[in-house]
Image (cartoon, helix red, strand yellow):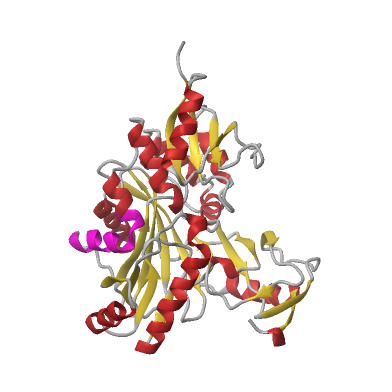
Amino acid sequence: MPPKEYVLLLGADQYLRERALLGTKQATDLPVWAAAEDAVRKPNRMFDNMLSADPMDADSLLRAIRAHSAQGWHPKIVVPLNDWTVDSANTVNRVLGLGGLDATVVVNARNKYAMKQALLAAGVPTPRSQLVQSEQELLDAIAAIGLPVVIKPYDFGGSGGVVLATTREEAVAGLAESKGVVAQHGSSYNIRGDKYLVEQFVDSDDEVSVEVLCGAGRAQVVAVTEKYLSPRPWFAEIAHLVPSHRTGDQALTDLAVRACTALGIDRGLAHVEIKLAADGTAWVIEVAARPGGDGIMDQVERAYSLNPYRLHVGSYLGSDLLDVVAGAVPTKTSAIVFLKASPGRIQEVLDEKPLPPEVRSINISAKRGDLSQTAKNWSTREGFIELEWDELFKEKTWLPVAMAKRLSDEMFVVDEAAGE
């Protein structure tokens, strides 16, 4: 009797990654499974089946997979959809002989210091950095790199613990803050958080992310996203717009492809973050070996009428879809913007006001009594709106940010005297 095969998605049930299931169904006729630590008490009925396993732990996954093998079920491939599952997914793939990313590629994609060394070795422009653990090592790094610097955990994401420091005193306080974020959230995302990157600051608010479909020996840019960041000293991502007006910048897209090649990413989507300095120099900040988060994939799908998860999963299954990507063109602009109340205690949430016609969807996560904090990272948001325009912007537009601010000011009644 032939084996019964399935595709195992890791991270597909995470917030704003729900469209991964549909993309996988477009890529294959095989059943689609997911994993959860307690699939009995926390089932997700959208999937064909659920493994009772920690999706971030390869050993846990292998035990669950082998238990189902007794009934004739075997994974065709395991596909990671977020940072926290890149290692576990590809470890399982290698153990079971299913393919997947090379172990060195996974290290380079998860360890920001190793990533930057690989980029520099390949001649890809990226800010200088040093790895530190102690306050003294921090001060030594500042002496070598020069101020200002950016301090961040070397294996985290979502702008968690990322702080700008313009003085030695700010740097010491920034390292303490970064350690505090890791202490608060690290265990939930299975990160070590024992080291921190001190990085040369690129003084610019112009930043994009580039989604690249990678293959063996070649790659193709899917989309360029314009990113909007919170005020310094933090770098919270407050909005993403697709397509960026920089989409046709060949030098920019070539740089993103070079970055993926430098890290050896040979399958699936990669998420490349690039900052553009005032003199026009493009700097690769980070590269992730998975689809972009924060609902960026949904905006790409709306703008291009192409589900990026189909590309990601199809690539892991061995399909060459680069020509499909090359033929895709945007026909509209789509954006996701995160709602932000003023700092203080939320007294009321007025969520029944009329919405502008550009609003495609709205999700309010805050409720009465919540404490609103300054935008620092993903955890300080009060919800989001998705916007759509039947036009392609030829220059950077601030419409998404302005619209979200107006709606936030109208929706959230805040007692600012309550403080943070």
Q: Of residues 140 and 124, which is closer to you in this image?
A: 140
The answer to whether residue 151 is above or below residue 359 is below
**Residue 298: % across, % down:** 56, 52
Would residue 308 be counted in the magenta stretch? no
Q: In the image, is 294 to the left or to the right of 314? A: right
Which residue is located at x 46 percent, y 33 percent? 63
Res. 362 image quadrant: bottom right
The answer to whether residue 11 is above or below residue 181 is above
- Quadrant showing the C terminus: bottom right
Q: Which residues are magenta?
A: 108-121
Which residue is located at x 35 percent, y 67 percent? 195
Which residue is located at x 26 percent, y 56 percent? 258
Q: Of residues 270 and 128, which is closer to you in this image?
A: 128
Q: In the image, is 327 to the left or to the right of 147? A: right
Q: In the image, is 144 to the left or to the right of 55? A: left
**Residue 117: % across, % down:** 23, 62
Question: Is residue 99 visible from the viewing direction of this image?
Answer: no
Res. 365 image quadrant: bottom right
Would residue 110 be counted in the magenta stretch? yes
Magenta-highlighted stretch: main secondary structure? helix
Q: In the image, is 367 to the left or to the right of 189? A: right
Question: Is residue 198 visible from the viewing direction of this image?
Answer: yes
**Residue 302: % across, % down:** 57, 51
**Residue 350: % across, % down:** 79, 70
Number of dots carrying numbers: 0
Q: Of residues 143 and 57, which is closer to you in this image?
A: 57
